[in-house]
Amino acid sequence: MDGNRFSDRPADLVLLGPPGAGKGTQARLLQERFGLVQLSTGDLLREAVAAGTPAGRAAGEVMASGGLVSDEIVIAILRDRLAAPDTARGAIFDGFPRTAVQAEALDALLADAGRGIVAAISLEVDDAAMVERIVGRSTCAGCGEGYHDSFKRPAEPGVCDRCGGTAFKRRADDAAETVGARLTAYHAQTAPLIDHYAGQGLLSRVDAMAPIDEVTAAMAAVVETALA
Ligand SMILES: [Zn+2]
């Protein structure tokens, strides 16, 4: 769109949100609208390992032995990645930081590069509604069509609208206890990060239960305000 207005300052963002909050979709839309690059930690690690950079080789050794890649290695990989010109408009950090210590390390890295987080956007969900949303999902075993017990039932109960199949699958991860436990863990893990960015006056909470285009509009407004 009219991202050129913002070309003088990188819009580095942190995106926080539990699984199922639509983080991936929203990050993609922000990328398109503002020319940002989403830096998802899992992807970055895989790319660095494949590229065989020094930090990538270090990460590869740790991963091969089943260990957790240290913050230092992740920061080194991020430093390399931020040197690439495609991040000049800004980066969307997704999956890192996960702790307050990591957030401080990221702040220091960005400061060294003459940039900084302009906003931390927390996609907020209603846990009970989120459990209902995820737990009700099923897919047709025949054609893969998606259904939902509350929001999208087949016209004829138990028969796929698309292929007439009668077998449906549910993911084990979508069980209510699993989803609830995932949300509880997310909130516990994220609280210190929320505090970190709130303390810097950078935290914006966006209602992720709203329709997708409203969520996108709210996030875009946060970015525009941060850059104004
Ligand atoms: Zn089907």
Image: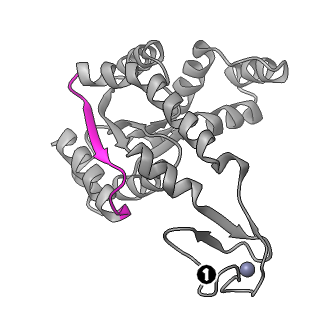
Image coords of residue 60 (percent x, y): 78, 24
Q: Relative to 225, is 63 on the left or the right?
A: right
Above or below residue 16? Residue 96 is above
Task: Spot the residue most to the right.
Answer: 65
The quadrant where residue 89 appears: top left
Residue at horizontal 30%, vertical 24%? 197
Residue at horizontal 31%, vertical 20%? 195
Assign ligand 1 to one image quadrant.
Answer: bottom right
Above or below residue 157? Residue 223 is above
The residue wearing badge 1 is 154
Residue at horizontal 58%, vertical 19%? 76
Residue 40, visible in the rendered structure: no
- Scheme of image coloration: one colour
Residue 149, visible in the rendered structure: yes
The quadrant where residue 216 appears: bottom left
Label 1 crowd (10 A; few <14 / some 14-19 / many >=20): some
Q: Amino acid at mark 1?
A: Pro
Q: Is 209 contained in the magenta span?
A: yes
Task: Spot the residue most to the front.
Answer: 157
Q: What is the span of residues highlighted in magenta in the rendered image?
A: 200-212
Above or below residue 72? Residue 119 is below
Image coords of residue 191 (percent x, y): 39, 23
Most foreground residue, 98 or 152: 152
Image coords of residue 16 (percent x, y): 42, 36
Residue at disc 1, secondary structure: loop
Most foreground residue, 163 or 112: 163
Image coords of residue 113 (percent x, y): 39, 22
Q: Relative to 33, is 145 on the left or the right?
A: right
